[in-house]
Image (spheres, grey):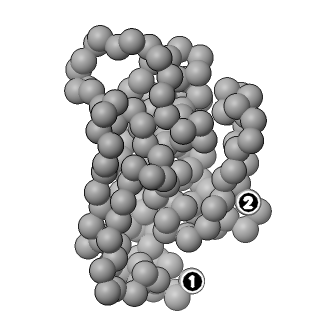
Amino acid sequence: MHRDFHSGNILYDLGSRDRWNFNRLFIIEWKIRDLGLSQAVNNRSSNNEIYGVIPYIAPEIFKESKFSQKADIYGNLLRVVNLLLMLNMIFILDVRLLMENDLKLQDDTPECYATLMKSCWDPDPKKRPSIKNIYNTLIMYLAICSQFKI
């Protein structure tokens, strides 16, 4: 588990490729940095302190201080979708919105992305998709969008 996913810790390199060529998403080089708070998934010891950038912290962390892979999913997907759409769709000023899981998307967010993001924000971490499911869904959406030049 990374335990501190946010916009500064996920890097990507498009090189000289056109950043709007979504057909090439799968060859973008993604890098994760700042592994200082990361732990093995099966590590049961934790100091239960909350670390990270507030908009990227899963609501259960504030309630239970329990990190999991699903908490990483919550924060990671916000970054990926923001990168894909080149938008800043979410800006959270109030920690209470996170705790109440009352996040809002901009009205012009494409429905396919809105649905995926909402599934990653499910209050029950067990109901959030895996990173593999997210990847496959995004590739499918991007293929459809590029086919219809959306």
User: What SS does tag 2 mark?
Assistant: loop
Residue 109: name its quadrant.
bottom right
- x%, y% of residue 101? 67, 33
Amino acid at the residue labelled 2: Gln
Choose mark 2 or mark 1, whichever is in front. 2
Looking at the picture, how far across and down is residue 12, in whole percent?
Answer: 35, 65
Image: 133 above or below 141: above
Crowd around label 1: few <14 · some 14–19 · many ≥20 (10 Å): few
Residue 135 position by quadrant: bottom left
Residue 120 picture location, percent across and down: 52, 42
Question: Can the viewer see residue 121 in this picture?
Answer: no
Identify the residue at horizontal 46%, vertical 77% (top origin): 144
Under circle 1, the secondary element is loop
Question: Looking at the figure, which quarter contains the N terminus?
Answer: top left
- Residue 25 shown left or right of residue 149 in the figure: left
Q: Would you name the residue on which mark 1 appears?
A: 150
Tell me the residue that label 2 is attached to: 106
